[in-house]
Image (tube, rainbow, N blue to C red):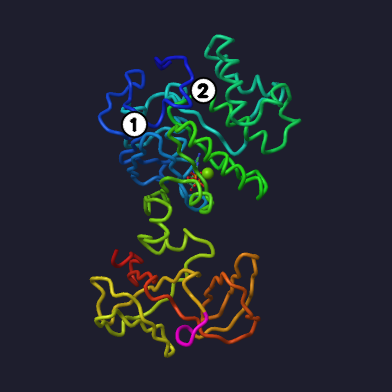
Amino acid sequence: MVDRPETLRYPSMRGGGGSGPSRGGIGRHMAEVAIRSLRKNYGAVEVIHGIDLEIARGEFVVLVGPSGCGKSTLLRMIAGLEEVTAGDILIGDRRVNHLSPNERDIAMVFQSYALYPHKTVRANMGFSLKLRRMDKGEIDRRVNEAAEILGLTPYLDRYPRALSGGQRQRVAMGRAIVRDPQVFLFDEPLSNLDAKLRVQMRTEIRELHQRLKTTTVYVTHDQIEAMTMADKIVVLNGGHVEQVGSPLDLYDRPKNTFVASFIGSPAMNIIDGTVQGIGASGARIDLGHGTVVDAPAPPGLTEGARVKLGVRPEHMRAGETGLPIRVRVVEPTGSETHVVCQFQDREVTAIFRERVAFRPGDAATLALDTESLHIFDGASGMRLGA
Ligand code: ADP
Ligand code: MG
């Protein structure tokens, strides 16, 4: 068992300050969690290919990526639920590779809430503390405080079956909060909730984090969840990191076409082209069939180069020159309208904030917002320029 004071440190003792002796660290750096050249094999198959990551104290980091990219495996290695094949995991300057989950001072919240059906909310929340043989008065104090934070006070004597999905998820979070861990780990905790509740719980978890400031690693496949919740997003793909950055960094400067099309909904349009010419005011990109558009000319762009032109849906508008398109589908959301169009042999999607009169079958021209275009190398898909 880790030597630590049995007092609840929230709301104020996380997020600032140095790491005290009870944190097991000597404050060499501010990373609460550090991952070094981490690899994972299942049998002969390597599923995590050498990941490096630093998570600062108090940071809310979201691991996002498509299904099967290794998010849960990475999180479970941090938790101590999966063995590490190679590399190191440090929590607060302690190398934890060979420590069991309950020696790591973490608390994990899963998609399946995994509540004990025959225990009340109060007993569910206090159970891990009881196992630790914590004093009953202290358990009550922590459970009551966590219940208060989560709005669960009226439900403390209920059984899980008498709770809604959202309430059950709050109990699962309560169970993590009472342990007052150094790091919270979440694995798709909102995936079982309906859309409206998901949005509400997103906000609640963020507010909880603002209050407790506990370092958090949160896994989701949902890029909107990642964008709205994260201080820092780590985009994973096929067991490696594609990019790490703040939500708007990733949105405004995706490093490659994978991140460009993964972050943002509807996705960025990515159109193949060839650099026709470069002048003082920028580049001219030939998109084929007589369509040529203006674009920025990042350093290194050369005439004749094959490129992929990235256009966010909100950076297109009806205009005189640009992409000749035919409207396929019009999707009003109320606040904006998504217009799915045919451009040559591909689909492009535009977002209009104003109401539009487009109807399926209409021919139109979509002008591109030149300054907002992204240019990627045609072969590697890597971003050109800043
Ligand atoms: P994610 O959580 O991003 O959907 P996972 O971390 O669950 O992805 O899985 C990453 C890869 O590892 C997948 O290819 C998956 O099939 C494989 N995998 C996960 N768990 C095991 C296991 N216990 N045995 C073998 N392969 C596994
Ligand atoms: Mg998973």
Q: CA distance from mark 2 to mark 1?
A: 20 Å
In the displayed structure image, the side of residue 276 where residue 257 appears, left or right = right
Q: Residue at x 62, y 79 (%)?
A: 328
The region drawn magenta spans 318-323
Q: Quadrant of residue 157?
A: top right
For disc 2, the marked residue is 179
Toward the viewer: 181 or 144? Answer: 144
Quadrant in the rendering for residue 377? bottom left
Please indicate whether residue 35 sits to the left or right of residue 327 in the image.
left
In the displayed orientation, state which residue is furthest to the right: 162
Pointer 1 local density, CA inside 10 Å: few below 14, some 14–19, many at least 20:
some
**x, y percentage for residue 27?**
28, 27
Looking at the magenta stretch, what is its main secondary structure? strand
Q: From the viewer's perspective, is residue 366 above or below residue 337? A: below
Looking at the rendered structure, the kind of residue marked 1 is Leu
Q: Which mark is residue 90?
A: 1
